[in-house]
Image: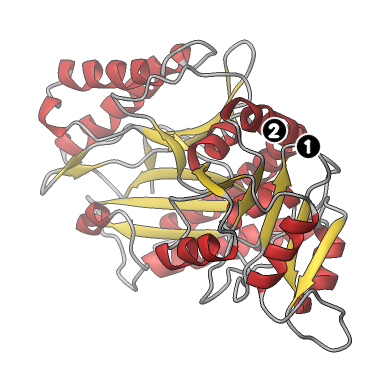
Amino acid sequence: MTAFGNPSRIERLRARMDAAGIDVIVSFKPENSFYLTGFNPIIYSHPVIAILPRTGAPSILVHALRDDHARASSFVSDIRLYGAWSTKVTMGLHWQAALASLLAEAGLASSVIGIEEEFVPLSRYRELEGLLPKATFKDVSGLIMTTRLVKDADEIANARAAARIADVGMDAAIAEVRAGGSERDISLASMAAMNRFWADTFPDKEVCDFGSLEGGAQNGLATWALAGDRMFMNCDNPTPRKPVAGECVSIFIWTIIDGIHAENERTVMVGEQPAENLRAIRSILEIRAELEPLMKPGTPISALFAATKAGLEARGYGKYLPGRIGHGIGLGAHEHPSLDAKTDIPLEPGMIFTLEPNLRMPGIAATQFSDTILITPDGCEFLTQSVGGELIA
């Protein structure tokens, strides 16, 4: 993925480390190690470990077979190797010994070490305790996620690019619905259009997502469509089922550019609709319009949920309240915060989230509308700009 030099997020995170008394962060979570280094190996069959001291140069510990890739991608210059691969010179065969040696070299083996307790397995935590018996471990999961809330300029630029790709995919998906395609046809047409647009428009950008120890995600441009009663499944592999007149189709699109996601979701009506379907769609579109003036710096997230709740209750949908009406988006397709009744975080410029108040009325109607939205100094900017409203095929 493209490197941008030392991003401002590193210094913002270090300020929080200082306030929390954290001497060094040792990050294993793929999204966070990328956040701290700019390197995504795509396949995480060997851990990528980002080491960010409160002061001094950061470093990254990777398996030797990832050496060339890391040096071509990371904005961190201190790249250390473990394992065995060709003629590469490493710090040892295993990451455990290499990490202990690296921290000792930096004088941090007896320090307060921040780890991601929400991600690190218990077995790895015990390994770290054994490797570093004089260290004190503190959870930094929330500290990193809080820093990730406000995006840097490069992240915002990538979100805009990802949103442009999602819009192209939505246009192609809607066209395929109108052509009478199946769920699978709709999804394939959308993904083909997005991949062609990516290749032609963003030749220097990557669309890989974050992998795991058991696999990788070479391409994160994804679309799935669900028709009729399958809309209630929310997420499933598209099938050869074709929507018929009187049904709706939900189209879900996730995209990613250089580590940053966008989301674009729409409901398309196929032919004349039952009155309850049409009323549900119009109600959600009206509520989304009512929320737009509230999407500005200073508004607590809970206020957005409260306004949605009031709008649904006023229209007779009180018993169908969703658990949330959106979520943060960035390195994760779904990340903190949840746009719900309990989250009082005030909106700030640079935050990016999805807005998706929707209805699920089993056996009656379902809606799905979602946009990726950037909070600006004066309000908000819809990064996804696909046609909305009463889409009819």
Q: Amino acid at mark 2?
A: Arg
* Residue 318, horizontal then vertical, whole percent: 13, 25
Mark 2: secondary structure: helix
In the displayed structure, would residue 240 be above or below residue 59? Answer: below
Image: 99 above or below 379:
below
Amino acid carrying label 1: it is Thr
Kindly identify the residue that appears in the image at 66 percent across and 40 percent down: 23
Q: Which residue is mark 2?
A: 14
Please state which of residues 373 and 112 is positioned toward the viewer in this rendering.
112
| Residue at screen point 19% across, 56% down | 229
Residue to which mark 1 is pinned? 55
Q: CA distance from mark 1 to mark 2?
A: 8 Å
Residue furthest front in the image? 134
Q: Callout 2 environment at 10 Å: few (<14), some (14 to 19), or many (20+)?
A: many
Q: Between 260 and 145, which is closer to the camera in this rendering? A: 145
Circles 1 and 2: CB atoms closer than 8 Å: yes
Q: Position of residue 351 (x, y in %)?
A: 57, 27
**254 and 128: which is toward the camera:** 128
Quarter of the image where one finds residue 153: top right
Disc 1 or disc 2, which is closer to the eye? 1
Q: Quadrant of residue 206?
A: bottom right
Q: In this image, 179 relative to 92: left or right? A: left
Residue 358 x/y as whole percent: 29, 35
- First in sequence, mark 1 or 2: give its number: 2
User: Would you say residue 259 is visible in this rendering?
Assistant: no
Identified at 46% across, 55% down, the residue is 119
Give the residue drawn at x 53%, y 38%.
145
Q: Name the residue furthest bottom.
A: 86
- Within 10 angstroms of label 1, few (less than 14), some, or many (20 or more) residues? few
Q: How far across and how far down the image is residue 354, in percent?
A: 47, 35
Question: Does residue 348 show up?
Answer: yes
